[in-house]
Image: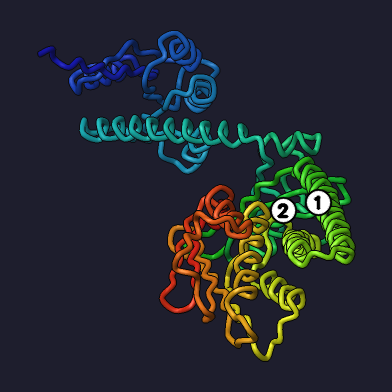
């Protein structure tokens, strides 16, 4: 296994006394550091720092030449970003104040112990490393902040902009630094005070995020502003971060879609209205034709056709008048359908009652029409055959949701019952043939007949087809 290579720390020593300089060099080497060279002037220190780029500079304050240690340290720090530790015998206030300006990483007073020097060097190197990490993190944050395409801004409690990203400044055709210190309502709204619905105001009052969408006349744009609170260590709101989006195009698209939907809704209502009217014309023609027929059987056939047309016409009438053009409330539809059948067959309501139990069922048109025809056929069948010779009785219609999106429809009567010798699946009756076709082919459902008490048809089909 290869030994880990540890790179030694390279230190530049700046000392105007050559003997002291050599002693410091030897001490540093004994402590495990590399010393590239020892120089005695500020000019030489700057030149060697530029050439060698040491990890750290030990700088005496009083030096030979025109540049003292403080000036040299300032130049090295600002131009080469190399940490400087002062190594001097001067501790007066004036010297210390001058040294502070250069932001040194340490201050060692002569004479010193080896341990003091090593501690000062290691602390300076650690501080320099941490400072570099902080600078890098700040740079990465700044890059990320300015890479966001949305308008991002930081606001203080007084509604003043503390920081904005490049997208925010570009949007307002200026530079970020020119916006800092100005109030957000001045920039965004062109007003002298914030709106009552201002998200920043809501954040300050409610201490929680706030979002608002609005048209801004000052900019002629629709904006979406989301504000999130910034808390201090005590949990107090000291400002907020805003993300502003220009949603003008989205709003225009939404308006176009809404307009288009209204146009299509009007067109669809017109289609339902015209289909209903055309069916009314067909029903009227059938009624007029049946009025001149002499054969009772043919007249009955015409009347049954009228009822079928009316059941479909009623579906279109419901859709035409409904707020929901996709689904209709089937409970209301069945009530009107059964009332029409009672009138059509001239039923005495005191003798034969039709009871409905339909709740929570809405159907789309491609299911509603075959289902309406199915209900029409089975109720008509009960009214025609279940109560002969004026017998009284009851017809029931029950419809309710079943498992897994299915619907259960039950149409029953307590009349004389369905003839035992007849198979309702194989009959010459057009009405029952239509019932089987509607259930199997159009509804994709199942149908059963229960003859135990009167007649009961049980039908199951998927609510959405």
Residue 297: % across, % down: 73, 64
Residue occupying the point 51% across, 32% down: 140
Viewer-side residue, 325 vs 381: 381
Residue 313: % across, % down: 78, 60
Residue occupying the point 65% across, 47% down: 243
- In this rendering, would 338 be left or right of 124? right
Disc 1 target residue:
268
In the image, residue 57 sits, relative to residue 150, either above or below, namely: above
Please state which of the two labelled residues, at mark 2 or mark 1, is closer to the viewer.
Answer: 1
In the image, residue 26 sits, relative to residue 140, either above or below, namely: above
Q: Residues within 10 Å of mark 1 (few under 14, many from 20)?
A: some
Tell me which corner region of the image, top left, top right, bottom left or bottom right, holds residue 309.
bottom right
SS class of the residue under badge 2? loop
In the image, residue 118 sits, relative to residue 397, either above or below, namely: above
Residue occupying the point 88% across, 58% down: 285
Tell me which corner region of the image, top left, top right, bottom left or bottom right, holds residue 111.
top left
Q: Residues within 10 Å of mark 2 (few under 14, many from 20)?
A: some
Residue 219: % across, % down: 86, 45
Viewer-side residue, 347 vs 461: 347
Viewer-side residue, 131 vs 400: 400
SS class of the residue under badge 1? helix
Q: Residue 160 got which mark? A: 2
Viewer-side residue, 411 vs 232: 411
Quadrant that contains the N terminus: top left
**Would residue 30 be seen by someone viewing this image from the given angle?**
yes
CA–CA distance between discs 2 and 1? 53 Å
Q: How many marks?
A: 2
Residue occupying the point 50% across, 23% down: 68
Q: Residue 150 got which mark? A: none
């Amino acid at each position: 296994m290869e030994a880990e290579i540890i790179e030694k720390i390279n230190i530049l020593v700046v000392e105007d006394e050559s003997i002291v300089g050599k002693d410091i060099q030897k001490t540093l080497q004994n402590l495990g550091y590399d010393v590239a060279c020892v120089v005695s002037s500020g000019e030489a220190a700057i030149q060697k720092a530029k050439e060698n780029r040491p990890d750290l500079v030990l700088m005496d304050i009083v030096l030979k030449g025109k540049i003292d240690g403080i000036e040299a340290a300032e130049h090295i720090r600002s131009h080469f970003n190399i940490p400087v530790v002062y190594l001097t015998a001067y501790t007066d206030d004036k010297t210390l104040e001058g040294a502070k300006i250069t932001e040194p990483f340490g201050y060692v007073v002569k004479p010193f112990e080896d341990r003091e020097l090593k501690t000062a060097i290691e602390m300076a190197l650690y501080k320099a490393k941490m400072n570099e990490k902080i600078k890098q993190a700040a740079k990465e944050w700044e890059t990320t902040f300015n890479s966001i395409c949305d308008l991002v801004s930081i606001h203080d409690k007084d509604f003043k902009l503390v920081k904005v990203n490049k997208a925010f400044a570009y949007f307002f055709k200026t530079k970020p630094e020119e916006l800092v210190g100005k109030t957000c309502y001045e920039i965004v709204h062109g007003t002298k005070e914030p709106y009552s619905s201002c998200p920043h105001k809501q954040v300050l009052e409610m201490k929680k995020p706030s979002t608002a969408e609005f048209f801004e006349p000052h900019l002629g744009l629709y904006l979406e502003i989301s504000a999130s609170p910034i808390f201090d260590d005590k949990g107090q709101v000291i400002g907020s971060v805003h993300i502003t989006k220009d949603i003008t195009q989205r709003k225009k698209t939404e308006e176009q879609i809404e307009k288009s939907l209204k146009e299509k809704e009007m067109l669809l209502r017109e289609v339902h209205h015209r289909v209903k009217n055309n069916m009314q014309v067909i029903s009227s023609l059938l009624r007029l034709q049946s009025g001149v027929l002499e054969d009772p059987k043919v007249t009955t056939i015409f009347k049954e056709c009228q009822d079928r047309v009316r059941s479909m016409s009623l579906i279109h009438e419901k859709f035409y008048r409904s707020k929901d053009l996709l689904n209709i409330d089937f409970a209301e539809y069945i009530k009107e359908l059964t009332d029409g059948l009672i009138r059509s067959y001239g039923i005495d309501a005191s003798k034969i009652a039709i009871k409905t139990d339909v709740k929570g069922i809405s159907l789309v048109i491609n299911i509603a029409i075959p289902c309406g025809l199915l209900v029409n056929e089975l109720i008509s069948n009960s009214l025609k055959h279940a109560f002969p010779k004026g017998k009284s009785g009851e017809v029931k219609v029950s419809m309710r949701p079943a498992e897994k999106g299915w619907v259960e429809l039950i149409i029953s009567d307590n009349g004389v019952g369905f003839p035992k010798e007849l198979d309702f699946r194989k009959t010459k009756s057009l009405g029952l043939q239509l019932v089987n076709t509607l259930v199997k082919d159009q509804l994709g459902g199942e149908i059963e007949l229960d003859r135990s008490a009167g007649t009961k048809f049980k039908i199951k089909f998927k609510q959405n087809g």
